[in-house]
Amino acid sequence: MASIHSDIRAALETHISAAGLNLPTSIAYENVVFTPTTGTSFMKVEYLPTLNRPAVRGINPQLRYQGVFSVMVFTPEGNGPATADDYVNKVINRFAVTTDISFTNAQNETIKLSIDYAERQQGLIDSPWYYVPINIGWYIYK
Amino acid sequence: MIGPVVKMTKSPRARLESINKLMEEKLKLRLLEIAKTAVNLSPVDTGAYITSFSYAVGPGRPRGKSSKNKATGQSKQQMEEEGFDGLKSDVNRITDLTNTAAISLRNNSPHALDVEYGENWFKTDGYFVFTKLRNIYG
């Protein structure tokens, strides 16, 4: 049986990297060497599990897993916030509240991940980039 | 009929006061729980970040320490205790907890954004302390 965390991570990363979303195609994944090209927008994603608690009482209870999928949208510094805002809105729409994301792993097991919230933060400068963090809250019962 | 026995000997005013007291205790415990999680989730090198948390109920200078010229490799446990003690004293200083409109948890160290998002760090990713707190406590 595959780890639930690998499946959740894969579900989230597959959902954001799907074709046709008009989002930056360069994505910096965790622990993967990534060198951004100055002047080209990119995204950085991180998987942050926070809780793993029994959802009910009794032996062998169903578990509730929850956490955050952090997406940071980087656009070139000095060009205004419009490009970043456009990408951010697309990410938030993609992970709209109450969305369910299905993912089937190599063992043919399907999980259905629920989105709790998708919230953006204020834009920040990290020269030569302007970036906006987006926090996507997810949960799943398994 | 068999059911729970509720004693109603106290006057309404006394009952209200005891409910208020209970609420205050619950709120205090919740704030301490959040404080404990905040320090647990925080990284420790010089200890400047972890000891820069403060609970604030209004204007006032929050704690904020710089890591510059501080010895690195500090004990995680010791710094966690120091950070937690600061927050505990903030909670104990709030006089009328049940009538306080808002309490904010802040970290005013100059590198708080670096710790959160890994900004300006080349090898380490951010620790997302506040992001995780928000996810756990809503």
Image (cartoon, rainbow, N blue to C red):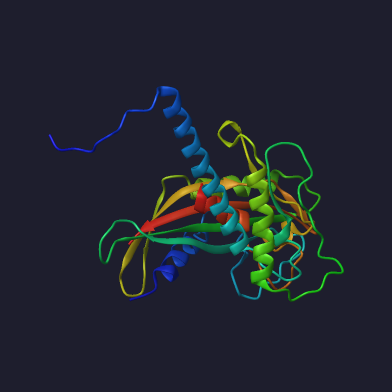
Where in the figure is residue A127, as x and y percent of width and height? 80, 58
Instruction: Give left or right: position of B16 versus A60.
Output: right
Instruction: Give left or right: position of A80 versus B24.
Output: right
| Residue at the spot 45% in from the left edge and 23% down from the top edge | B13
Q: In terms of image quadrants, where is residue A55? A: bottom left
Where in the figure is residue A64, as x and y percent of width and height? 37, 58
Q: In terms of image quadrants, where is residue B70? A: bottom right
Where in the figure is residue B36, as x and y percent of width and height? 58, 58
Q: In terms of image quadrants, where is residue B51? A: bottom right
Q: Is residue B80 above or below residue B26?
A: below
Q: Looking at this view, is B39 or A132 the one in front? A: B39
Where in the figure is residue A37, as x and y percent of width and height? 73, 66
Q: Looking at this view, is B68 or B4 the one in front? A: B4
| Residue at the spot 54% in from the left edge and 53% down from the top edge | B33
Query: What residue occupies the far top of the structure in this picture?
Result: B12
Query: What residue occupies the far right of the structure in this picture?
Result: B69
Instruction: Give left or right: position of A111 versus A119.
Output: left
Q: Is residue B60 above or below residue B45?
A: above
Q: Please indicate, yes or no, whether residue A50 appears anywhere in the rendered image.
A: yes
| Residue at the spot 44% in from the left edge and 51% down from the top edge | A115
